[in-house]
Image: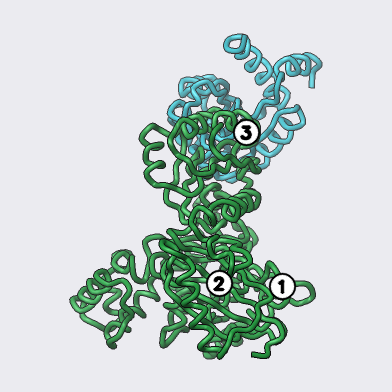
Chain colours: A cyan, B green
């Protein structure tokens, strides 16, 4: 990890942040998600790992009960767009308007231009979308950045 | 009477006061006695009547080394549970209350509304169990709910088993109520820890509820009222499963008790999924009690018929549908009435079989196949009880039946419903003398004697079935 990211992260961790992770829908590809969860834990986050085959609603239930700061949704089997439809709306419904939402993996079927895929997920209400091959370090940097900008906005 | 050492085990029930006298050294049942339930007037009347009955049967009462009681009288232990997410802390709170022997009169999730609080006050619970949030997780909702309960007219004790980080604030908002703080029923996401809440509820039961219900007026004749009766049955089941000291128990087991108003199912079993099966949902407590409020042999006979289907019930009893409906009407009009005619006995038998079948099916887990792009995956919800070694039937509906084995066979897996994880080939045992509760009570004083007593008095049933088991093994 770059020194930059570590410094930024330390600034963003006044109290331990809780992150819910899992693989959405009928998807069993757990390996990448598990590596991500371990890396997040190592970086000092509290991780609530839901594992494979997790319905969208279960992410939200877990986030409500644990007062999570972020949800990270993995999808590797090409059905991510269907599984994630309405995810932000579900969060708003559950009182999690401001929760940070990331999605990553093989989000769509076939070879599609990443920027259009990314835009589709951002339009759905995700704060970040990660294409295949995104490095853990990048995700940690995103988190540090997003958490610190949020605390500037909402936590004086 | 020359019995060296004897114990008296009392169940202050909702209909009867039941006694079991046991010889502690010979590990045998000396006799039983029964009187009416008189908790609402003077508990001693029923107890004296039961003691007189026992005296007459034994030809004199021995001196009792222990006189221990359980109670399900005066409406049982009426509880309301409050949690956050329905499937998470609200469910964990529900399981803790059931495991503490409660009669659940209301379960609430998310923020309590004014109407909810009024409803809780009307339910007149004996205890409110307040949960919500994992430790360090959501605290806003459990604090708001503590504030709502604190400002209400609800006067009963509140057991707090929510987010630890919110406990202090919740307690100060509940000032004026009797509050007991215990460990969170869900300290981490999807991790259950219901034993501390169960213990706290039992403590409140002994310290306060027994007095509030007037059961402690029996203290001249009783050493201690230790637990609600369902807990006594559960403790009996736990002792039988786990054994004591060097004496081995029966291993994982299920107890089914089709009662007049509800059907209780207890299991002492991990119910872990087989290799390759993916578990989903909350983890299961090894000692688990479920109560089916719509399946009761007397007060809820009509709903058994509704759930099972009147045609199936009639076919089971080999009677015309109209005849069965007439008998069900008769039961509804006089719930004290025991079956007399051959037709009534047939209907009772069918009711018991279906109540047991439905209650055990609900208690057991299920599997389903999820089709994923990488192939089918088997997903399990709840406990897998297919490999269970022992099923025990207790309660009057089974013990008094002509063919108890056929009722207990309703607990078995049905090849036509392969997704219900019911026991495949357990041995069937009958608690003919209704001793399980007594053993659960006695276990607090002399576990070894209690275990041996239970082991010697359970009656094996259905030899032809054991034969099948030997063949399939």
Task: From the viewer's perspective, tell me whether residue A43 is left or right of residue A155.
Answer: right
Image coordinates for residue B379, horizontal then vertical, percent: 54, 55
Disc 1 with disc 2 on a shared chain: yes
Q: Residue furthest front?
A: B220
Specify whether residue A29 is in view.
no
Q: Chain of mark 2?
A: B
Q: Which residue is mark 1?
A: B446
Image coordinates for residue B5, horizontal then vertical, percent: 70, 82
Q: In the image, what residue occupies the spot 55% across and 76% down?
A: B392
Label 3 CA crowd tier, 10 Å (few <14, some 14–19, many 20+): many
Disc 2 with disc 3 on a shared chain: yes
Q: Which residue is mark 3?
A: B167
Q: Which residue is mark 2?
A: B10
Image coordinates for residue B9, horizontal then vertical, percent: 59, 74
The residue lying toward the viewer, choosing from B72 and A142, is B72
Q: In the rendered image of this protein, does residue B175 appear above or below residue A9? A: below
The residue lying toward the viewer, choosing from B431 and A17, is B431
The residue lying toward the viewer, choosing from B297 and B8, is B8
Query: In terms of image quadrants, where is residue B2?
Result: bottom right
Q: Earlier in the sequence, mark 1 or mark 3?
A: 3
């Amino acid at each position: 990890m770059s020194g930059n990211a570590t410094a930024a992260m330390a600034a963003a961790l006044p109290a331990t942040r809780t992150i819910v992770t899992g693989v959405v829908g009928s998807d069993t590809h757990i390996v990448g998600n598990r590596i991500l969860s371990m890396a997040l834990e190592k970086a000092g986050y509290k991780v609530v790992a839901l594992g494979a085959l997790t319905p969208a609603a279960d992410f939200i239930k877990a986030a409500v009960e644990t007062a999570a700061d972020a949800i990270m949704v993995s999808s590797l089997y090409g059905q991510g767009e269907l599984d994630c439809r309405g995810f932000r709306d579900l969060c708003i419904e559950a009182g999690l308007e401001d929760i940070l939402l990331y999605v990553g993996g093989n989000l769509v079927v076939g070879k599609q231009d990443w920027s259009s895929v990314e835009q589709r997920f951002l339009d759905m209400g995700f704060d970040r979308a990660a294409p295949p091959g995104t490095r853990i370090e990048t995700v940690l940097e995103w988190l540090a950045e997003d958490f610190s900008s949020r605390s500037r906005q909402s936590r004086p | 009477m020359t019995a060296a050492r004897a114990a008296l085990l009392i169940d202050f029930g909702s209909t009867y006061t039941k006694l079991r006298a046991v010889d502690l050294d010979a590990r045998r049942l000396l006799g039983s006695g029964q009187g009416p339930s008189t908790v609402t007037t003077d508990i001693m009347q029923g107890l004296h009547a039961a003691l007189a009955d026992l005296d007459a049967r034994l030809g004199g009462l021995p001196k009792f080394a222990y006189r221990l009681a359980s109670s399900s009288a005066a409406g049982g232990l009426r509880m309301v549970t409050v949690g956050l997410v329905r499937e998470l802390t609200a469910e964990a709170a529900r399981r803790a209350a059931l495991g503490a022997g409660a009669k659940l009169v209301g379960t609430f999730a998310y923020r309590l509304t004014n109407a909810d609080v009024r409803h809780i006050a009307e339910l007149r619970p004996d205890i409110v169990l307040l949960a919500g949030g994992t430790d360090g997780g959501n605290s806003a909702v459990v604090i708001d709910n503590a504030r709502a309960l604190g400002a209400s007219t609800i006067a009963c004790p509140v057991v707090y088993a929510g987010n630890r980080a919110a406990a202090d604030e919740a307690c100060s908002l509940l000032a004026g109520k009797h509050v007991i703080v215990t460990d969170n029923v869900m300290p981490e996401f999807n991790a259950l820890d219901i034993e501390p809440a169960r213990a706290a509820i039992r403590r409140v039961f002994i310290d306060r509820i027994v007095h509030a219900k007037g059961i402690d007026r029996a203290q001249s004749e009783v050493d201690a009222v230790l637990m609600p009766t369902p807990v006594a049955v559960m403790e009996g089941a736990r002792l039988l499963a786990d054994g004591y000291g060097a004496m081995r128990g029966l291993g994982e087991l299920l107890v089914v008790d089709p009662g007049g108003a509800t059907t209780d199912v207890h299991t002492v079993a991990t119910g872990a999924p087989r290799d390759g099966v993916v578990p989903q949902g909350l983890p299961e407590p090894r000692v688990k009690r479920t109560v089916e409020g719509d399946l009761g042999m007397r007060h809820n006979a009509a709903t058994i018929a509704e759930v099972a289907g009147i045609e199936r019930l009639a076919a089971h009893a080999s009677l015309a549908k109209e005849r069965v409906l007439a008998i069900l009407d008769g039961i509804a009009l006089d719930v004290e009435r025991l079956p007399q005619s051959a037709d009534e006995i047939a209907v009772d038998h069918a009711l018991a079989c279906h109540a047991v079948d439905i209650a055990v099916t609900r208690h057991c887990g299920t599997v389903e196949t999820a089709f994923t792009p990488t192939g089918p995956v088997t997903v399990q919800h709840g406990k897998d009880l297919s490999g269970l070694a022992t099923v025990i039937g207790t309660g009057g509906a089974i013990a008094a039946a002509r063919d108890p084995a056929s009722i207990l066979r309703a607990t078995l897996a049905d090849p036509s419903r392969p997704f219900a994880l019911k026991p495949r080939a357990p041995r069937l045992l009958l608690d003919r003398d209704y001793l399980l509760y007594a053993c659960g009570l006695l276990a607090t004083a002399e576990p070894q004697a209690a275990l041996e007593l239970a082991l010697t008095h359970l009656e094996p049933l259905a030899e032809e079935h054991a034969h099948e088991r030997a063949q399939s093994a």
